[in-house]
Amino acid sequence: MDMNYQRFLIPVAVIGLTVWAWQTSGWMGVAFVFSAGVMWLLLHFYRLMQVMKRATQRPIGFVDSAVMLNAKLKAGVNLMHVIALTRALGQLETEKNAQPEIFSWRDGSDSVVRCIFVHGKLQTWSLERPS
């Protein structure tokens, strides 16, 4: 789904779900929708913390196998998904907060995967292997 649609569709869906819950169950329905939203936020926060906890155990920009990372990448995934795959933060190669962002991950054989992210979504990537 396009990023522009998500900015409007998700809040409209939440409001619509809350109105539907109010009409069918009153305050209990609204409380249920609110509780489900808080649970969803907690689950995503927990996943974020686990990914970052694993990433702190490794050097920045290091991955076990750049070739395997290259095979697992898909266009459109977010940066957090790539960090979860590599279990390490990427080495930032552009200025901070510049678009597009370029991150790289290197393995023990000096093979490098460079990923280009636009607004946090993976656009393209390349694998460079030493000769």
Image (spheres, helix red, strand yellow):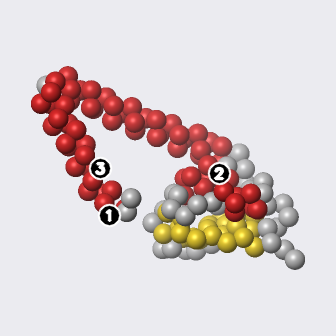
For residue 27, say whether it is visible.
no
Image quarter of residue 57? top right
x%, y% of residue 25? 16, 24
Q: Residues within 10 Å of mark 3 (few under 14, many from 20)?
A: few
**Quadrant hosting residue 89:** bottom right
Please tell me the numbered disc located at residue 10. Answer: 3
Say what amino acid the circle numbered 1 marks.
Answer: Asn
Where disc 3 sits, the SS reads: helix
Q: Nearer the viewer, residue 46 or 18?
A: 18
Amino acid under disc 2 = Leu
Position of the C terminus by quadrant: bottom right
**Amino acid at pointer 3:** Ile
Question: For the residues marked 1 and 3, what is the alpha-carbon distance in whole angstroms?
Answer: 11 Å
Residue 70 vs residue 78, the one in the foreground: 70
Residue at image point 55% right, 74% down: 95
Q: Is residue 93 left or right of residue 46?
A: right
Marks 1 and 3 close (CB-CB < 8 Å): no
Q: Which residue is mark 2?
A: 85
Disc 1 target residue: 4
Image location (x, y in percent) of residue 30:
20, 29
Q: Looking at the picture, does residue 67 appear above or below residue 41?
A: below
Instruction: Confirm or deny contact between disc 1 and disc 2 (CB under 8 A).
Output: no
Q: Tell me if residue 49 comes above or below residue 96 in the rendering.
A: above
Alpha carbon separation for disc pair 1 and 2? 26 Å
* Disc 3 and disc 2 in contact, CB within 8 angstroms: no
